[in-house]
Image: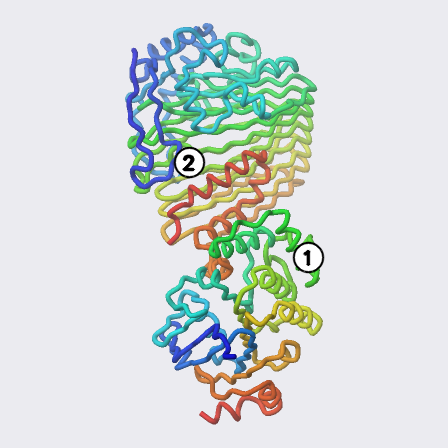
Amino acid sequence: MSKTPLLEIEDLCARVADKEIVKDFSLTINEGEVHAIMGPNGAGKSTLSYVLCGKPGYEVTSGSVRFKGKDLLSMSVEERAREGLFLIMQYPVEIQGVPVTTFLKHAVNAVRKHQNLPELDTMEFIKTVREEGKKLGITPDMLKRPINVGFSGGEKKRLETLQLAILKPSLAILDEADSGLDIDALKVVAEGINAERNEHNALLVITHYQRLLNYIEPDYVHIYADGHIVKSGDKNLAIELEKNGYAAFVKEQ
Amino acid sequence: MDNKQQTPEILDESGDKYKYGFTTDIASETISKGLSEDIIRQISLKKGEPDWLLEFRLQAYRYWQQMKEPTWAKLSYDKIDYQDLYYYSAPKQKVAPKSLAEVDPKLLSTYEKLGIPLKEQEVLAGVVAVDAVFDSVSVATTYRAKLAEKGIIFCSISEAVREHPDLVKQYLGSVVPYTDNFFACLNSAVFTDGSFVYIPRGVKCPMELSTYFRINAQNTGQFERTLIVADEESYVSYLEGCTAPQRDENQLHAAIVEIVVLKNAEVKYSTVQNWYPGDKNGKGGVYNFVTKRAACRGENSKISWTQVETGSAVTWKYPSCILQGDNSVGEFYSVALTNNYQQADTGTKMIHIGKNTTSKIISKGISAGHSDQTYRGLVRVSPNADNARNYSQCDSLLIGKNCGSHTVPYIENRNKSAILEHEATTSKISDEQLFYCQQRGLDEETAVSLIVNGFCKEVMQHLPLEFAIEAAKLINISLEGSVG
């Protein structure tokens, strides 16, 4: 049985402030797959995730991206999100005065409205959030606090994971999800993400350490340098990379 | 002079979202334009006032003629021609209404449109007693019998002058003397109505008291005057709401609120000010020059001002606390939102006179569009005010590139034991915050409203619940068109 493609990137070129960062990048992610993109610092890995999510200031100059068969690049940031694209951010921003639960409720209902589903009942919603939160070590008290305000790096990543668990996107991009995490927090976050995996969704893990891949096991590992994939392989590529460093692959250019 | 107002509804014509912009076609009785001793005598005569009140008005008028309109505020507006205004306009009633059944149904339907639970049966279902001031005259005060049982007086100030002259005479002008400032002086000369509240000793008012102000007639200044007296050990929570029709010319509103708080008493005063702000190009709108002041005269007395200011083309307003009694407490919680070409110069004054007095100022200013906003506040500690304490926090949020925000705090301390803290921040809604919200599926407008409401939360939580919900909606409406 052939696999159903979720994300199809073809010859994508993009720039930030007139600097070409993504160059002829191509990648297809099918349902049920986990892809890891690894590359040295400053290779533009985060740029790739922002381009896919449509962040203002990131300009696509050529190429195409299809998400569930639809033209992703013509969609607004929020449309991409509502279609099921989710970015676990490296540095989630703080919003004063907006409790986690309130924020999540707005997000869930925006997605549901897009899918022509009725708004969630508030009591039901709070119950679900608390249950999911508990699995990630997020207390009801934390849910009442303004989103990301005064949370530690680990807590912020757990909140990102909670949102993933509630919004249930088709494709989640993890942008350096392990930065700022100690090993215990990393395990909790990875377990949270793994629990959401099924045969219809997919993960794109962007990282420069192999460490995270011990907990979220990739089907494919791609080495990213100079704006595109220079080598692809299975999870052993990541181990090799950890041993020999990026230099060997970048030199191949 | 009879004067039938016939302005068609002009809602949404200019793409504005001011839902209170309708006018009511109702016969009104006005005194001819302009201001003179003669006009003031006519107003007083129409209202059947005692001589002492006429004398008070005339003294104020004579004093006002010597005064100059203040120019220190950071506001610019066309010069007001005080001779080109009507100073008295009242919905025409043959006989004073004895119950709501006798009030003009058109007037009641206006209030219904405004969402005021004026009808007796609706009021009975709620917990709010309402006094509604239409143009200059108080139209109906609901729920009075129930309040009277507790000895609470809640009526129009005109009625209070007739029925409780000693109380009015004792307190009127005692917190805001007519010499206070230009606009207060003008109000003292020409005020036509407003609300009066007296809470007797030891009584906790069992419900929120509410006044609703509405300017309807054209070219009419509204000069209402509110006087609240909380006797020893008493408590009252008072709400004030305001709207006006959408008109191309500017309307003048110069009100006074005086509050007297005696020993161990507490007054909570909440305002949602939504006078017509003008259209998106800055045409029309209400000029709002208001003097609000509370005197905490007794020990342990407390006043708390909470205001949500979204309306008016020009706002000049500094609800103040005179902390005379030892251990008295003053609080000021404010959200001011300006959009398009609105201007607001607003803040508070905390005057510490008694010992161990404390005050708190939380001001949240949101500027969008081409609007300009200034927080202006004074904290003064007198030589005898030992151990005075003030905490001030002024936060400004800017939306877009064309608005302005200014903070002008004045601190005058004459006592070494005072502890005064002032914090101020200015921020913009960042692109990162917007992207974060949008990445979770929120559109830009929802994201901005969420961020703004989060910014105001500390103030909004001091509003009574129903009022807070209304205020949050109002903020969202006022923000429309501010992004993109």
The answer to which quarter of the image holds residue B382 is top right
The outermost residue toward the front is A1
Query: Residue A216, can we see it?
Result: yes
Q: Nearer the viewer, residue B75 or B250?
A: B250
Residue type indicated by callout 1: Glu
Query: Residue A97, can we see it?
Result: no
Cβ–Cβ under 8 Å for marks 2 and 1: no
Name the mark nearer the viewer: 2 or 1: 1
- Disc 1: which residue: A131
Tell me if A123 is positioned left or right of B98 in this view.
right
**In the rendering, at what x and y percent does residue B32 appear?**
29, 14
The answer to which quarter of the image holds residue A57 is bottom left
In the figure, A172 relative to A99: above or below?
below
Residue type indicated by callout 2: Gly
In the figure, A110 relative to B150: above or below?
below
Please tell me how crowded label 2 is: few (under 14), some (14-19), or many (20+) other residues with Cα within 10 Å: many
Element type where label 2 sits in the image: loop
**Which chain's residue wears label 1?**
A
Element type where label 1 sits in the image: helix
**In the rendering, at what x and y percent does residue B471 appear?**
50, 38
**In the rendering, at what x and y percent does residue A122 appear?**
60, 47
- Disc 2: which residue: B311
Quadrant (top left, top right, bottom left, bottom right) of the N terminus of chain B = top left
Q: Nearer the viewer, residue A119 or B162?
A: A119
The residues bearing labels 2 and 1 have C-alpha atoms spaced at a distance of 43 Å
Tell me if B217 is positioned left or right of A207 in this view.
left
Residue located 58% across and 44% down the image: B458
Query: Is disc 1 on the same chain as disc 2?
Result: no
Residue located 51% across and 28% down the image: B240
Q: Nearer the viewer, residue B379 or A161?
A: A161
**In the rendering, at what x and y percent does residue A213 appear?**
62, 79
